[in-house]
């Protein structure tokens, strides 16, 4: 069993996980699996494949060895630096999960001061929550089993997502028609019906995996004579990376010609989301009839055996999505009720946010008023301090309380009289006047 077949149990999805390898022994992972632990999964795989012993065991392992956890026991034999790197990856993953938990609790206004991380981590099944520091064999076993289970449910989740997309599209169509007056509504309904009928007018779609469908690919894509169609040669032509199997990506590439009969991105009536859903349905149909060991891969042996079946030459007519409704009216009504509930919840949250915003504005205004009052009080205290210092004969204080000294004024030296105070000058003038003669003195004869 080659590396690709082994790890495809963990990484295969409908859009294909494996790109064409640079060589037969080098696999490049470049597509997100859609799992919330996708990065952790891919990094663990990449580190393990750097160990020669583990890589060799993986090459010789079968599907059951991987699924039942026997391969996990080989972890004890990998090199020390690989184990150290795996320990580091696990600690990073635990840290990431803790942040996710905190964000979830914060968003639901849950008090997380007494949060028990060990208990909360138990809800994540792809690692051992009891040991948060080292990557052990149990971690690899849990990672493999969880990824296998999650990827097996991936197609079902994609179908459900598409159903919700179609119901939302119909809901919006009905709401749009309600917004129009009667005349415009009738005209728009007629136009929509014409587009729907135009979409249904397409060439016959061959059943996926049938001789007619494969011969069409052989002729139009491969450019070969349809009368010389050979299943073994066809398989080798479309095993693009020459690994001996057709994976999901290689299978879906075979349906492009059939899908182009129904969908054209230039046409208003053709929905490309519906085209991808149709591609998924075709791939599931082939896998169901051809993939006998359910490993999500088609081997040459499985492919050749499928060409011997009666359905290969005489398949049932393929029903496209336009003839196969994906939801019922009851499902649509429940979906619309959910939309209304979500809309009401969003309105309540918006009102709560508006009230909180108003409260913050009021608090901002109050803080601004307090700031102004404080500034005014500081200015008044500074002014009073200056006045007190002026009365006491102290130098005035600056805005920060520092003393402000005025430069000393020098007295002129030339005229001493001008330098004297007015009162002293007047006293000096009086002292220099001649004394008055005494009054009423007796006269001499």
Image (spheres, rainbow, N blue to C red):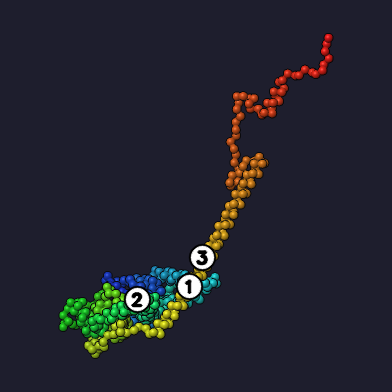
Disc 2 or 3, which lies upstream in sequence?
2
Q: Which corner quadrant holds the N terminus? A: bottom left
Q: Secondary structure at mark 2?
A: helix
Mark 3 nearby-residue class (10 Å; few <14, some 14–19, many ≥20): few
Identify the residue shown where x is 24% and y is 83%: 204
Say which label, 1 or 3, has the lower sequence index: 1
Q: Is residue 293 left or right of residue 438?
A: left
Residue visible at 59% across and 41% down in the picture: 404
Image x and y of residue 234, in percent: 21, 80
Percent coordinates x, y for residue 59 in the rendering: 31, 77
- How many other residues sit within 10 Å of disc 1, few (<14), some (14-19) or many (≥20)? few
* Most foreground residue, 229 or 54: 229
SS state under label 1: helix
Residue at position x 39%, y 77% in the image: 178
Residue picked out by circle 1: 347
The answer to which of marks 2 and 1 sits earlier in the sequence is 2
Give whichever of 149, 86 is nearer the camera: 149
Which residue appears at 54% of the width and 60% of the height? 364
Q: Position of residue 270 (x, y in %)?
A: 29, 76
Which one is closest to the eye, mark 2 or mark 3? 2
- Nearer mark to the viewer, of 2 and 1: 2
The secondary element bearing badge 3 is classed as helix
> What is the CA distance from the residue labelled 1 to the residue labelled 3?
15 Å
The answer to whether residue 316 is seen in the rendering is: yes
Contact between labelled residues 3 and 2, with CB atoms less than 8 Å apart:
no
Query: Compared with residue 135, is residue 406 higher up or lower down, i.e. above or below?
Result: above
Q: Residues within 10 Å of mark 2 (few under 14, many from 20)?
A: few
- Judging by the rendered image, the residue that carries numbered circle 2 is 184
Question: Residue tagged by mark 3?
Answer: 357
Among the 4 quarters of the image, the one containing residue 230: bottom left
Extreme residue in the front direction: 183
């Amino acid at each position: 069993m080659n590396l690709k077949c082994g790890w495809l149990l963990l990484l295969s999805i409908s859009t294909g996980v494996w790109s064409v390898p640079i060589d037969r022994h080098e696999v490049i992972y470049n597509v997100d699996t859609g799992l919330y632990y996708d990065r952790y999964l891919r990094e663990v795989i990449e580190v393990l494949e750097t160990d020669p012993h583990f890589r060799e065991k993986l090459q010789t392992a079968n599907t059951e060895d991987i699924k039942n956890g026997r391969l996990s026991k080989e972890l004890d034999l990998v090199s020390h630096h690989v184990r150290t790197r795996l320990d580091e990856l696990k600690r990073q993953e635990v840290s990431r999960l803790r942040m996710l938990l905190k964000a979830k609790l914060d968003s639901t206004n849950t008090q997380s001061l007494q949060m028990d991380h060990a208990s909360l981590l138990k809800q994540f099944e792809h690692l051992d929550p009891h040991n948060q520091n080292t990557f052990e064999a149990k971690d690899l076993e849990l990672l493999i089993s969880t990824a296998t289970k999650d990827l097996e449910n991936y197609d079902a989740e994609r179908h459900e997502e598409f159903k919700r997309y179609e119901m939302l599209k119909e809901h919006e169509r009905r709401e749009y028609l309600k917004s129009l007056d009667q005349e415009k509504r009738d005209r728009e309904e007629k136009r929509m019906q014409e587009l729907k009928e135009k979409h249904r007018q397409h060439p016959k779609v061959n059943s996926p995996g049938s001789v007619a469908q494969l011969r069409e690919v052989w002729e139009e894509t491969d450019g070969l004579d349809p009368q010389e169609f050979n299943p073994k040669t066809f398989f080798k032509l479309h095993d693009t990376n020459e690994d001996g199997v057709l994976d999901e990506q290689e299978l879906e590439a075979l349906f492009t010609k059939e899908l182009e009969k129904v969908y054209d991105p230039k046409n208003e009536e053709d929905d490309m989301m519906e085209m991808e859903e149709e591609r998924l349905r075709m791939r599931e149909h082939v896998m169901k009839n051809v993939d006998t060991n359910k490993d999500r891969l088609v081997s040459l042996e499985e492919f050749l055996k499928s060409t011997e079946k009666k359905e290969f030459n005489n398949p049932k007519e393929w029903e496209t999505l336009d003839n196969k409704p994906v939801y019922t009216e009851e499902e649509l009504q429940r979906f619309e009720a959910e939309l209304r509930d979500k809309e009401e919840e969003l309105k309540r949250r918006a009102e709560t946010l508006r009230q909180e915003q108003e409260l913050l504005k009021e608090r901002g205004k109050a803080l601004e008023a307090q700031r102004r009052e404080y500034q005014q009080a500081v200015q008044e205290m500074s002014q009073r301090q200056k006045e007190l210092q002026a009365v006491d004969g102290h130098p005035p204080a600056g805005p920060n309380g520092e003393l402000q000294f005025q430069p000393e004024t020098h007295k002129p030296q030339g005229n001493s009289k001008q330098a004297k105070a007015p009162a002293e000058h007047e006293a000096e003038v009086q002292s220099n006047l001649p004394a008055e003669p005494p009054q009423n003195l007796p006269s001499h004869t």
